[in-house]
């Protein structure tokens, strides 16, 4: 019985390769976490402490800024939170319903102009909202729905359809055609197959689309900035920007407002992380 030993050069290469990978990953984590940590530290300090010692942990932590933002009506935090929730939930519901129906048509049904319509949807990926926001504003003004949450919901929904339709179409296409044929033989209509069989199988993909839509809608600043004029309709991203402009000299208070505004997104992402990964990586259905 012979025992083979790894070549020393190979061990050295493997060590440096693994070391470089961990070093790069650690550097990325530090670059991402350091601003967040400083922001949290600042939220739990007084204004003077944040100006003189921004990198030192708050000992003891001071909750005055957090309590003030949550309790003072002049800061309107709860009102902005309500507006953001209304927009996010409405956009997510509309996107999931429309995209699932459209993806089913493009994936499982055949008609003459199918390729043309699908190409028109994919063209939407080539026109980001930053480019199209000016003509969109003119259309909304003609419809007389400027300065309303409905306008924000409508625009956000429209610009999230193309990418999510492609995600769901890929998942629906991967479902075996034999399953659909068997359902038709058993007497199912096209909608029955979609509602009773396809949607339950597509829960991971639907969960991923819903989670991604929620995060994008919650963090959107451009559409509320262009569409909304009344401060009672501001969402949290727009309210955060206005708050920084009004109270920019008190960095600890601004830090507390930013942390509270971002906290729902962070919590939701950690809850939905597995669902997002499972939905985006699911590419086949095993029978």
Image (tube, helix red, strand yellow):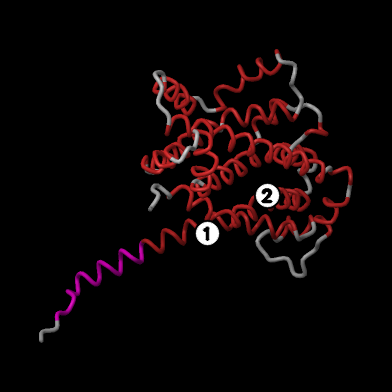
Say which residue appears at 51% left-offset and 36% top-offset: 164
Q: Main secondary structure of the magenta part?
A: helix
- Residue 8 counted in the magenta span: yes
- Residue named by callout 1: 30
On residue 262, which mark appears? 2
- The first of marks 1 and 2 along the sequence is 1
In terms of depth relative to the viewer, which is nearer, 25 or 88? 88
Q: Is residue 32 left or right of residue 154?
A: left
Say which residue appears at 64% left-offset and 41% top-offset: 219
In terms of depth relative to the viewer, which is nearer, 148 or 223? 148
Q: Position of residue 109 (x, y in %)?
A: 43, 29
Say which residue appears at 63% left-offset and 34% top-offset: 94
Q: Is residue 11 left or right of residue 220?
A: left
The quadrant holding residue 49 is: bottom right
Where does the magenta region start and end? 4-20
In terms of depth relative to the viewer, which is nearer, 34 or 220? 220
């Amino acid at each position: 019985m012979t025992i083979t030993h790894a070549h020393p050069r190979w061990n050295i290469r493997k060590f440096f390769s693994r070391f470089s990978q961990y070093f790069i990953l650690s550097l990325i984590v530090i670059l991402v976490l350091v601003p967040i940590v400083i922001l949290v530290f600042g939220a739990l300090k007084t204004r003077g402490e944040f100006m003189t010692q921004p990198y030192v942990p708050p000992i003891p932590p001071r909750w005055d800024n957090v309590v003030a933002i949550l309790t003072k009506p002049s800061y309107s935090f709860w009102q902005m939170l309500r507006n953001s929730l209304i927009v996010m939930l409405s956009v997510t519901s509309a996107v999931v319903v429309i995209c699932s129906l459209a993806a089913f048509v493009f994936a499982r049904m055949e008609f003459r102009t199918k390729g043309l319509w699908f190409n028109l949807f994919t063209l939407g990926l080539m026109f980001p909202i930053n480019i199209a926001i000016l003509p969109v504003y003119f259309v909304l003004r003609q419809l007389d729905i400027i300065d309303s949450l409905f306008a924000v919901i409508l625009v956000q929904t429209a610009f999230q359809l193309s990418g999510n339709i492609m995600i769901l179409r890929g998942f629906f296409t991967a479902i075996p055609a034999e399953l659909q044929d068997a359902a038709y033989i058993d007497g199912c209509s096209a909608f029955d197959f979609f509602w009773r069989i396809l949607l339950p199988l597509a829960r991971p993909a639907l969960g991923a689309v819903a989670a991604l839509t929620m995060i994008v809608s919650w963090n959107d600043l451009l559409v509320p900035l262009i569409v909304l004029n009344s401060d009672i309709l501001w969402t949290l991203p727009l309210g955060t920007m206005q708050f920084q402009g009004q109270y920019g000299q008190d960095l600890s208070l601004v830090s507390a407002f930013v942390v509270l505004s971002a906290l729902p997104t962070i919590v939701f992402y950690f809850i939905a992380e597995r669902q997002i990964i499972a939905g985006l990586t699911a590419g086949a259905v095993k029978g």
